[in-house]
Image (spheres, helix red, strand yellow):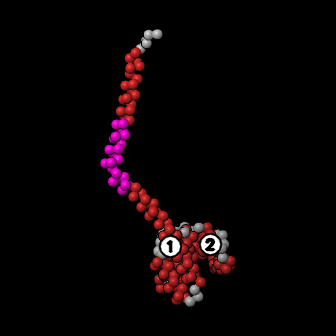
């Protein structure tokens, strides 16, 4: 039988050769590229390995730091001698700054170090590692310090900031203490009484103060 399209069959080996040639050229280009960029590739691999190792070392170091901070803080917490406790808390702050343990130590120092109490409370309020509850308590403690110093305006400035519901009773009680207006004082005492109570002694004190304030207004 006569071949109908001999050109088709003669073209097939040529197509195969061209395909093989293209593969060889691609392979040659790849080889040349690899040879030209070997150093860069090695450097990139080494950099990646170093990043991975560095990340692992950082995590391990961070874990070790947290464990050391926890141990020192716990040691400070159970220390009975006030001066030794203060020294240990200051060591936590100095050696593990930026950690939650340093922030907790600042809270302890606010009660231990009267001379620098405000500084410690400010540190708690502005620490990146602080929890909202810690910041709220520190702010209320600072307002109380201002009241004890007779600076009602500074106390009111601190008390204008919002706090969590569990701190509202103490905030309004302190606002009543900082108020120079009898009506505002009664209003804050009532709001303190209406707020969720976390301290029975404080609640009884507020009830007594409100009763006295109401009687005086009658």
How many marks the image carries: the answer is 2
Relative to the observer, which residue lies in front, 4 or 111? 4
Question: Along the horizontal axis of the image, is 168 left or right of 87?
Answer: right
Residue located at (51% from left, 81% from top): 89
Relative to the observer, which residue lies in front, 215 or 168? 168
- Asked whether the viewer can see residue 132, the reply is yes
Relative to the observer, which residue lies in front, 196 or 80? 80
Compared with 41, 80 (above or below) is below
On the image, the x and y values in percent for residue 44 come to: 38, 55
Relative to the observer, which residue lies in front, 177 or 171? 171
Q: Which residues are magenta?
A: 24-44
Instruction: Give the Cα distance between marks 1 and 2.
Output: 38 Å
Based on the picture, tell me whether residue 93 belongs to the magenta stretch: no
Residue located at (60% from left, 70% from top): 168
On the image, the x and y values in percent for residue 188 come to: 60, 72
Q: Which residue is mark 2?
A: 169
Which secondary structure, mark 1? helix
Mark 2, residues whose alpha carbon is within 10 Å: few (<14), some, or many (≥20)?
Answer: many
Q: Which residue is mark 1?
A: 65
In the rendered image, which quarter is residue 70 located in? bottom right
């Amino acid at each position: 039988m006569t071949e109908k399209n001999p050109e088709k069959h003669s073209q097939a080996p040529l197509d195969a050769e061209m395909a093989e040639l293209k593969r060889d050229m691609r392979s040659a280009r790849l080889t040349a590229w690899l040879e030209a960029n070997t150093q860069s590739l090695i450097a990139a691999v080494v950099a990646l390995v170093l990043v991975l190792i560095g990340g692992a070392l950082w995590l391990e170091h961070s874990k070790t730091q947290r464990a050391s901070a926890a141990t020192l803080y716990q040691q400070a917490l159970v220390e009975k001698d006030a001066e030794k406790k203060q020294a240990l808390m200051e060591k936590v702050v100095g050696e593990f700054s930026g950690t939650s343990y340093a922030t907790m130590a600042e809270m302890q120092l606010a009660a231990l170090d009267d001379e620098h109490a405000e500084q410690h409370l400010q540190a708690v309020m502005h620490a990146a590692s602080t929890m909202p509850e810690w910041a709220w308590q520190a702010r209320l403690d600072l307002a109380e310090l201002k009241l004890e110093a007779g600076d009602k305006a500074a106390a009111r400035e601190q008390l204008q900031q919002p706090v969590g519901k569990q701190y509202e009773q103490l905030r309004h009680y302190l606002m009543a203490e900082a108020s120079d207006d009898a009506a505002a004082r009664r209003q804050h005492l009532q709001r303190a009484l209406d707020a969720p109570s976390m301290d029975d002694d404080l609640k009884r004190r507020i009830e007594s103060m409100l009763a006295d304030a109401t009687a005086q207004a009658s």
